[in-house]
Image: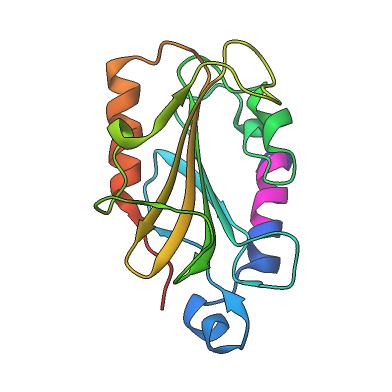
Amino acid sequence: MVPRYLNRVFLVASLVTVPAAAAAQGSGTLPPPGIRSNPAWLTVTTGPTNRSQHEPPQLFAITARWNSDAHALTPFDVFGGLKRLDASGALIWATTISKGGHPFAFKHVAWPPRLVDFRLDHGWEGQPLPRIQQRLLWIAAGAWNLDVRVYFGTQHPSKPLLAAVQAELNRLALPAP
């Protein structure tokens, strides 16, 4: 039997995910970042999004085997879901902001993103629990501007967890042209 939360994740993914190449052909759409499959992580994407919509295209990935409660993967309530993230879990949230120029100066760094390039926040506005750590990177890579965030269920992630997150960041793919 599939847990109810996975039914919702798969339903959301199947309803809003369309092939990125087809969606990118439509005028005014932005494709989400991609990711290569990894059984150690659960992923969901909002799929391509029209630029006039309020929500940009997004990708969410959460540790599956290390996280005791995969309910933390709640794309429509990320900060509420972070409360369920345990000390051995992490969530990656990548958002396509724009293609080409943008009024905000995005940091030009090599792709894929590296944890050492992220800003480390031990506390921030909207932080759901003091134990949650946020890492943030506004990155310009290729022709894309992206907002990539990593959340840990602890302020002191272990070396194996940091390595697992970096390995997952290495699987990220820039949005399809």
Q: Is residue 160 left or right of residue 31?
A: left
Spot the residue most to the left: 110
How far across and down, in percent of the image, does residue 53 sit? 75, 68
Residue nearest the observer in this picture, 28 or 161: 28
Is residue 10 inside the magenta stretch?
yes
Name the residue located 66 percent from the left edge and 50 percent from the top edge. 9
Residue nearest the observer in this picture, 60 or 8: 60
In the rendered image, the vertical position of residue 126 relative to residue 114, given as above or below: above
Residue nearest the observer in this picture, 88 or 150: 150
Main SS of the magenta part reads helix
How far across and down, in percent of the image, does residue 6 sit? 65, 45
Report if residue 52 is visible in the image: yes
Q: Quadrant of residue 23?
A: bottom right
In the rendered image, the vertical position of residue 153 relative to residue 73, given as above or below: above
Q: Is residue 9 left or right of residue 109?
A: right
How far across and down, in percent of the image, does residue 1 sit? 66, 42
User: Magenta residues?
Assistant: 5-11
Name the residue located 60 percent from the left edge and 66 percent from the top edge. 47
Residue nearest the observer in this picture, 111 or 87: 111
Name the residue located 53 percent from the left edge and 82 percent from the top edge. 24
Report if residue 36 is visible in the image: no
